[in-house]
């Protein structure tokens, strides 16, 4: 299989020491089990070539893989560039990992070239764009998913089982607190943080998770933002966003619950984890509280201070033979996409059959509807926004 990756940033390569680089590490791990011939990484800056080469060499040496990775710099004319790439080589699938506002243009160009496609979250900032992608995907009989890896986290799967068996009785409300260090908008995403906001970039994970856990659909949303820190330093976006969403059970329209999602990206750089995250779900018969930052593993070190480690997301861990392997729910989500594409291209399965718990583009219409409604509410003085049949 040949895989095209759009973007060479933190999530793909772990550039500038930001981590292992989830996308390339995952592909390298999967290549030990499936025939991935080559990965082509493309982005606009020629300077990425050295980053991609270094990441590929580091990953191959770490996990004992032999993944061939090459880099190509492209211009900003998305459709022409993707068409030209596809006339040079036949790719089986593509992974889009560029700044949020570019997801739509790249995903559309890829689907138009009849390639199966994985897009990092959020699918798109607007529902109209997401619907357009889903239309092209369906017309071409392609497999399209969004990288909502929280669907693979065992804690979330445990909560889903409990909610499915109605252990908590009737659901009343969810509260979510999710935040990241100020270094993310300030340094890591400096070139594009003012073109997104913390709800669209990060809060969307929990919107998809609530939809995944409950299968209820959002019907109304409103949001309030706080500002100051980032705007004062030239980054034109909210410090924090507080969204209220009302959800409805499609099988019983009187059955509704509320979610309250508070997100920020101005945590001090000395916070004990990049992501601080916890959620509670409250029903008439009880509550579940889930601390998704403190997984019980803490490091105290004279150089690093105190750090809470999440070993379950994506990292290099020893396997049964003592070899380091890339593991975790971040890897599982990308690995599942590649495995599914392999099954489709080898005609073992039809793309239309790939549903189940997969975060398909169609499933992502729900989280996109909420992102769109929250963005509109923020722009319109926190007015309530209705959502009608997003999926
Ligand atoms: N699922 C997750 O947990 C997770 C984590 C981090 C980031 N993300 C998402 O991944 C996406 C990328 O994040 P990142 O951390 O890699 O960002 P980044 O800023 O580190 O990298 C962005 C990459 O896009 C490239 N790029 C910029 N403009 C481009 C253009 N016009 N055409 C082609 N390439 C272009 C840049 O050269 C760079 O390689 C974002 O949408 C972000 O929300 C997801």
Image (cartoon, grey):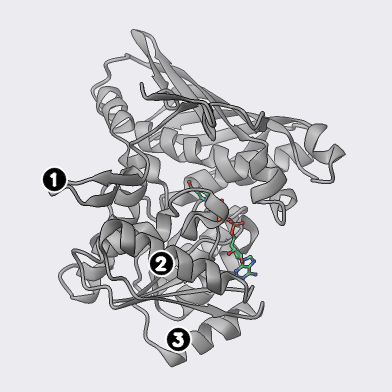
Between 247 and 234, the residue placed more toward the observer is 234
Q: CA distance from mark 1 to mark 3?
A: 39 Å
Q: Mark 2 highlights which residue?
A: 56
Query: Which percent across, then down, holds residue 312?
Result: 33, 37
- Closer to viewer: mark 2 or mark 3: 2
Query: Which percent across, then down, holds residue 333?
Result: 33, 51
Q: CA distance from mark 2 to mark 1?
A: 23 Å
Between 14 and 225, the residue placed more toward the observer is 14
Which mark identifies residue 320? 1
Between 150 and 234, the residue placed more toward the observer is 234
Q: CA distance from mark 2 to mark 3?
A: 23 Å
**Residue 90 higher or lower than 8, as above or below:** below
Q: Residue at x 31, y 26 (%)?
A: 159
Q: Earlier in the sequence, mark 2 or mark 1?
A: 2
SS at badge 2: helix
Q: Earlier in the sequence, mark 2 or mark 3?
A: 2
Q: Residue at x 15, y 70 (%)?
A: 348
Q: Are marks 2 and 1 in contact (CB under 8 Å)?
A: no
Which image quadrant for residue 280?
A: top left
Between 341 and 30, the residue placed more toward the observer is 30
Q: Earlier in the sequence, mark 1 or mark 3?
A: 3
Q: Mark 3 highlights which residue?
A: 86
């Amino acid at each position: 299989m040949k895989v095209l990756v759009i973007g060479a940033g933190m999530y793909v390569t772990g550039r500038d020491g930001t981590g292992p680089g989830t996308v390339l590490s995952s592909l390298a791990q999967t290549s030990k089990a499936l025939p991935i011939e080559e990965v082509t990484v493309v982005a606009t800056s020629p300077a990425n070539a050295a980053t991609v080469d270094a990441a590929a060499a580091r990953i191959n040496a770490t996990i004992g893989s032999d993944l061939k990775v090459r880099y190509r710099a492209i211009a900003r004319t998305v459709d022409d560039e993707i068409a030209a790439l596809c006339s040079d080589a036949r790719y089986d699938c593509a992974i889009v990992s560029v700044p949020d506002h570019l997801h739509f243009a790249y995903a559309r160009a890829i689907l138009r070239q009849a390639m199966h496609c994985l897009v990092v979250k959020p699918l798109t900032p607007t529902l109209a764009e997401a619907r357009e992608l889903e239309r092209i995907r369906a017309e071409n009989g392609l497999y399209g998913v969004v990288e909502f890896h929280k669907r693979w986290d065992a804690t979330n799967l445990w909560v889903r089982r409990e909610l499915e068996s109605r252990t908590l009785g009737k659901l009343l409300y969810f509260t979510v607190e999710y935040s990241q260090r100020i270094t993310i908008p300030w340094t890591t995403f400096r070139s594009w943080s003012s073109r997104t906001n913390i709800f669209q970039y990060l809060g969307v994970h929990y919107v998809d998770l609530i939809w995944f856990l409950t299968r209820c659909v959002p019907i109304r949303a409103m949001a309030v933002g706080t500002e100051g820190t980032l705007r004062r330093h030239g980054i034109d976006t909210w410090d924090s966003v507080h969204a209220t969403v009302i959800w409805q059970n499609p099988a019983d329209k009187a059955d509704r619950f509320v979610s309250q999602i508070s997100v920020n990206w101005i945590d001090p750089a000395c916070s004990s984890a990049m992501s601080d995250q916890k959620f509670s779900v409250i029903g008439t018969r009880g509550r579940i509280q889930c601390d998704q930052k403190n997984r019980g593993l803490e490091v105290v070190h004279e150089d690093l201070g105190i750090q809470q480690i999440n070993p379950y997301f994506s990292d290099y861990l020893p396997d049964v033979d003592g070899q380091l392997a890339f593991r975790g729910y971040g890897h599982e989500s990308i690995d599942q996409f590649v495995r599914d594409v392999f099954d489709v291209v080898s005609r073992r399965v039809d793309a239309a059959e790939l549903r189940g718990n997969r975060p398909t583009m169609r499933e992502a219409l729900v989280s996109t509807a909420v992102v769109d409604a929250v963005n509109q509410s923020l722009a319109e003085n926190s007015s309530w926004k209705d959502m009608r049949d997003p999926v």
